[in-house]
């Protein structure tokens, strides 16, 4: 099931996938606007990121008290070992996948493991919890808000039924500003982590699922976290049962009986690669070859114990045993609270699985720390109408030499017990087998009184949810910074207006200057013409004056000559 943040209202999936459907000092509570700026500054480099050796998505894996008591049967070692094996199986699916551009080897690793041993008065682990799955996911994100920046993903395992759903998760987007899924920033306004998912071991009717169905549910939800929506209805990504069956990201739960059921479709691999190329460098890490990760709940190379995130007097936080401690009950079922090997005949428990119905009680032998194999049952019934054979649950069809399958909805037989003789044989109802119990998987959803009831919603893209979240956060940001926004708005209005007025004034000034230059030019021409005329006149008058002077000189000479003859 795909969960979108925009749909978050306490009613329906917000950003979900219906499959369905330690204080961190590095954590900073930055504002939404600051986050957008920070994201934008690295958009270009993320678009074509070469992940190199950054191939590991570290997960914070949490088991609530329902899962601890229902699947781990109250044993820390059993719960922890089941969780570790579960992620190991899911990791196998991811690492085998060839993503877009040929990327391989990308996988998962438990970065931190938390087990809630008791119920609380409120919150996620309240007893008789009546929350719908989207509310559980939201509460999980709030309780582990401060773990957001430390891990690639946060995932919750539970063991309670939810109407029409087996899992829920935020789907990632390759768009840099979209929240949700892998490497996502937290919603700081709501103090909620959004790189989260939740999976339940129960079907909607409250029955325990087959282990392979639960494992595929967890892988499906993490697939959403990595950026894959539900597979579209096409031959390439949703082939028929005879062509290999639906892929892992099909919108309905899968039984794991078809060869494609535990594989990602081409549509999914392309979508995931797009997201990892855009965001993977932000939170994927390099694998630590040959080095254990202290705090993941598993005893790795160089560790004497590993308590995960649990309080344990037998094991220190540096994964070293306490003084005089022989073991830790967190890691071994036959280790006492006093950190010693449990005595002979101490009852111990293995986590529930598909074969649990075929096993009797188990007791410690006083020597080994691990819980010995229990007594084995034969010819008794077990999960999914199977039959026990020497402690192993053999499915209905396998017990009859055939293969399990799901009949088509078109024939109306989807909620009947169906088998096929060989891989290529048609899937048909087994005569006399009757109907599947309520809650069992059919092609379109879940069986209810012999009818296949559609339950999952089509996957929507996250941007609708995110847009609403950004809008709400932006409103809050504006209210908290009203003076800044008034100043900013004034500048946004004033500066363009000032530029326009300045341009207009400059234009007018240039036009006036040109006009003045023309006027001055005309005036200069007129002055020049007048000046020329004056000069010509002066020259003419000068010539006349000179002529008259010469004439006067001649007259004076003549006059003197007449008065004073020689």
Image (tube, helix red, strand yellow):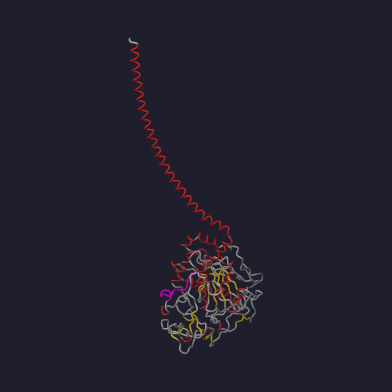
Residue segment shown in magenta: 225-238
Q: Is residue 352 left or right of residue 274?
A: right
Q: How far from the left and from the top, in percent, is residue 225? A: 51, 70
Q: Nearer the viewer, residue 357 or 303?
A: 357
Question: Where, by quadrant of the figure, is residue 186 drawn?
Answer: bottom right
Seen as rendered, the residue at the extreme bottom is 432
Report if residue 274 is visible in the image.
yes
Q: Nearer the viewer, residue 370 or 468?
A: 468
Q: How far from the left and from the top, in percent, is residue 14? A: 53, 72
Seen as rendered, the residue at the extreme top is 566
Q: How far from the left and from the top, in percent, is residue 8? A: 54, 71
Question: Where, by quadrant of the figure, is residue 302 drawn?
Answer: bottom right
Q: Nearer the viewer, residue 162 or 507?
A: 507
Q: Is residue 341 left or right of residue 44?
A: right
Q: How far from the left and from the top, in percent, is residue 541? A: 36, 27
Queried whether the magenta region covers residue 228, the answer comes back as yes
State which quarter of the image contains the C terminus.
top left
Queried whether the magenta region covers residue 213, the answer comes back as no
Instruction: Give the residue drawn at x 63%, y 68%.
Output: 316
Q: Looking at the picture, does residue 155 appear above or below residue 44?
A: below
Report if residue 298 is visible in the image.
no
Main SS type for the magenta part?
loop
Question: Where, by quadrant of the figure, is residue 337 drawn?
Answer: bottom right
């Amino acid at each position: 099931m795909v969960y979108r943040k925009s749909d978050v209202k306490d009613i329906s999936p917000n950003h979900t996938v219906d499959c369905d459907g330690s204080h961190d000092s590095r954590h900073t509570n930055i504002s939404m606007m600051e986050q957008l700026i920070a994201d934008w500054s690295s958009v270009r480099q993320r678009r074509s990121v070469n992940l190199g050796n950054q191939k590991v998505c570290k997960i914070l894996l949490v088991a609530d008290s329902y899962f601890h008591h229902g699947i781990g049967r109250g044993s820390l070692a059993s719960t922890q070992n089941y969780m570790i094996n579960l992620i190991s199986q899911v990791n196998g699916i991811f690492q085998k996948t060839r993503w877009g551009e040929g990327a391989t080897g990308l996988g998962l690793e438990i970065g931190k493991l938390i087990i809630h041993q008791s119920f609380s008065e409120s919150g996620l682990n309240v007893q008789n919890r009546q929350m719908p799955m989207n509310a559980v996911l939201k509460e999980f994100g709030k309780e582990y808000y401060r773990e957001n920046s430390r891990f690639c993903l946060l995932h919750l395992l539970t063991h309670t039924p939810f109407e029409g759903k087996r899992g829920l998760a935020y789907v990632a987007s390759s768009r840099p500003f979209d929240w949700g899924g892998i490497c996502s920033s937290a919603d700081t306004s709501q103090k909620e982590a959004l790189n989260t998912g939740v999976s339940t071991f129960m079907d909607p009717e409250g029955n325990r699922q087959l282990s392979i169905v639960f494992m595929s549910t967890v892988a499906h939800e993490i697939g959403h976290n990595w950026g894959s929506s539900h597979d579209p209805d096409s031959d390439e990504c949703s082939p028929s049962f005879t062509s290999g069956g639906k892929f892992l990201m099909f919108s309905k739960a899968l039984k794991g009986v078809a060869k494609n059921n535990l594989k990602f479709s081409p549509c999914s691999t392309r979508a995931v690669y797009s997201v990892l190329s855009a965001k993977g460098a932000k939170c994927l890490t390099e694998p630590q070859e040959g080095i254990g990760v202290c705090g993941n709940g598993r005893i790795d190379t160089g560790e004497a114990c590993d308590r995960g995130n649990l309080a344990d007097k037998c094991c220190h936080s540096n994964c070293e045993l306490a003084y005089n401690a022989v073991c830790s009950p967190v890691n071994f079922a036959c280790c006492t609270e006093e950190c010693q090997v449990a005595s002979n005949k101490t009852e111990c428990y293995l986590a529930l699985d598909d074969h649990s119905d075929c096993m009797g009680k188990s007791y410690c032998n006083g020597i080994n720390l691990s819980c010995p194999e229990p007594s084995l049952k034969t010819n008794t019934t077990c999960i999914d109408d199977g039959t026990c054979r020497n402690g192993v649950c053999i499915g209905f069809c396998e017990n009859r030499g055939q293969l399990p399958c799901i009949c088509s909805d078109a024939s109306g037989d989807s909620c009947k017990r169906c088998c096929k003789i060989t891989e290529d044989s048609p899937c048909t109802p087994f005569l006399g087998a009757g109907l599947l119990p309520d809650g069992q998987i059919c092609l379109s959803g879940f069986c209810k009184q012999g009818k296949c009831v559609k339950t999952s919603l089509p996957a929507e893209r996250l941007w609708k949810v995110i847009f609403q979240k950004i809008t709400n956060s932006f409103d809050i940001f504006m209210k908290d910074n009203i003076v800044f926004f008034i100043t900013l708005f004034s500048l946004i209005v004033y500066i363009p207006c000032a530029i326009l007025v300045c341009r207009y004034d400059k234009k007018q000034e240039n036009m006036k200057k040109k006009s003045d230059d023309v006027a001055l030019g005309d005036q200069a021409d007129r002055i020049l013409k007048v000046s020329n005329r004056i000069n010509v006149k002066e020259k003419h008058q000068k010539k006349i004056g000179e002529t008259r002077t010469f004439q006067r000189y001649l007259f004076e000479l003549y006059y003197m000559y007449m008065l004073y003859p020689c």
